[in-house]
Amino acid sequence: MKPLFIVLSAPSGAGKTTLCDLLLQNYPELCYSVSCTTREPRVNEEDGVDYHFLPVESFKRMIAEGAFLEHALVHDNYYGTLKQPVYDVLREGQCMLLDIDVEGAGQIRDTVRGLPAGDPLREGFIDIFISPPSIADLKDRLEGRATDSSEVIAKRLRNAEKEMARAGEYMFRVTNDDLDIAFRRLCDIINTKAELI
Ligand code: 5GP
């Protein structure tokens, strides 16, 4: 497959992590971009695998050094994508998958637009927004996974509405009301792009 640069966004609880895992299992040439964050690790999360967990001072220093392709404050914590690994993976001819918020995706879109033709980030770029079937469904999913406090869930739901209002900025939108159908739709989008570049 051609080196694709795939950005996925979704409100937390919309099933994005499951869909990302399915993509990674089905496309061996796809690498997952491990983001940096200043939030605390959850149970079962591993440093360097799920995220690079950093103190705020280190994160801010890296912003100043220009290490990030994009960065954003999400639910009061910093999150960012390191520039170097993305370029390294694409230049090796592999594909990179980013799971980032709408703000970060907007920054990447702006960056990609300003890149010269032939730049690997520009050639392989697609962005996809995954929507939950409804806010009520999202609330059920967040409460069901029981990893966050009720305040955190309330904040995530408020944020979800804002994020869903920006779904129209993405090249593609997929509603995850049925995991198999959503996954097949994602594969179609990716396979079509891979044929076009
Ligand atoms: P969580 O804390 O639940 O893992 O992620 C919270 C939100 O942060 C999700 O919407 C996720 O997509 C987003 N996120 C994760 N990594 C990054 C990143 O590197 N940059 C940006 N802008 N958002 C990120």
Image (spheres, rainbow, N blue to C red):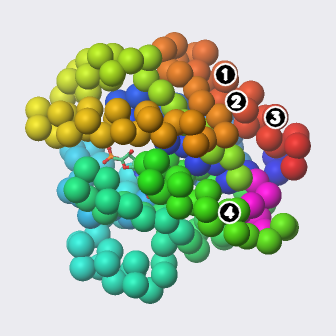
Residue segment shown in magenta: 119-124
Per the model, the C-alpha gap separating discs 2 and 1 is 5 Å
Q: Judging from the image, what secondary structure is the residue with disc 1 in? A: helix
Q: Is 84 located above or below residue 27 in the figure?
A: below
**Closest to the observer, 122 or 25:** 122
Q: Judging from the image, what secondary structure is the residue with disc 3 in? A: helix
Q: Are marks 2 and 3 in contact (CB under 8 Å)?
A: no
Q: Circle 2 is placed at which residue position?
A: 187
Whether 102 is among the magenta residues is no
- Estimate the x, y position of residue 151 in percent, counting from the top left: 11, 38
Q: Are marks 1 and 4 in contact (CB under 8 Å)?
A: no
- Estimate the x, y position of residue 53 in percent, counting from the top left: 30, 64
User: Mark 2 against mark 4, which lies toward the viewer?
Assistant: 4
- Estimate the x, y position of residue 29 in percent, counting from the top left: 71, 48
Q: Are marks 2 and 1 in contact (CB under 8 Å)?
A: yes
The amino acid type, in three-letter code, at marker 1 is Arg
Per the model, the C-alpha gap separating discs 1 and 4 is 26 Å
The amino acid type, in three-letter code, at marker 2 is Cys
Per the model, the C-alpha gap separating discs 2 and 4 is 22 Å
Q: Quadrant of residue 159?
A: top left
Q: Circle 4 is placed at which residue position?
A: 112
